[in-house]
Image (tube, helix red, strand yellow):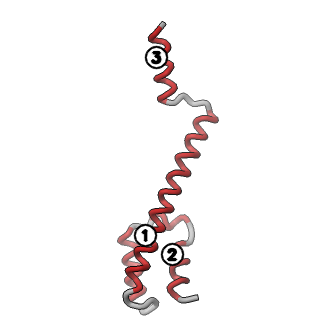
Amino acid sequence: MEMKDIIKKSILLGMGLLSYTDKEIEKAIHALEKSKHIKAGEGEELIKDIAGQIKKKRRETTAFINKQALKAVREARVATQKGLSQLEKKLSKK
């Protein structure tokens, strides 16, 4: 396994990755280029790849959280805005 692959897998490890900003990723990759751990020029490709994967994971995580929140609201039988609006319409007709 190439050093580039090891670095990539290390960076992608864990949910902490979601908190990385594009600037932080660029800074880390450029530091690796300067220290000769990866070849000059490989950094930009690596930055794009990692940033793309982070964005994908953020979308997946957001969708999962939204799904779980809706599930919790339904199971707790908490009134939703839609449900309250429907109830108000019924009451106003009487």
The answer for how far apart the CA atoms under marks 2 and 3 are is: 53 Å
Q: Which mark is residue 51?
A: 1
The amino acid marked with disc number 1 is Ala
The amino acid marked with disc number 2 is Ile
The picture quadrant where one finds residue 46 is: bottom left
Residue 28 percent coordinates (x, y): 41, 79
- Residue 91 vertical position relative to residue 72 in the rendered view, above or below: above
Q: Is residue 12 left or right of residue 40?
A: right
Given the current orientation, which residue lies at the most extreme top position?
Answer: 94
Quarter of the image with the N terminus is bottom right
Residue 15 percent coordinates (x, y): 54, 64
Q: Which mark is residue 64?
A: none
Disc 2 packing (10 Å; few <14; some 14–19; many ≥20): some
Q: Are marks 2 and 3 in contact (CB under 8 Å)?
A: no
What residue did someone put label 3 on?
A: 89
Instruction: Give the residue displayed 46% in from the left and 16% down from the top.
Output: 89
Instruction: Give the residue displayed 45% in from the left and 63% down from the top.
Output: 55
The amino acid marked with disc number 3 is Lys
The answer for how far apart the CA atoms under marks 3 and 1 are is: 47 Å
Instruction: Give the residue displayed 57% in from the left and 30% down from the top.
Output: 78
What residue did someone put label 2 on?
A: 11
Instruction: Give the residue displayed 46% in from the left and 17% down from the top.
Output: 88
Q: Are marks 3 and 1 in contact (CB under 8 Å)?
A: no
Q: Secondary structure at mark 2?
A: helix
Q: Secondary structure at mark 1?
A: helix
- Residue 57 vertical position relative to residue 88 in the rendered view, above or below: below
The mark closer to the camera, 2 or 3, is 3
Q: Earlier in the sequence, mark 3 or mark 1?
A: 1
Q: Are marks 2 and 1 in contact (CB under 8 Å)?
A: no
Residue 59 percent coordinates (x, y): 48, 57
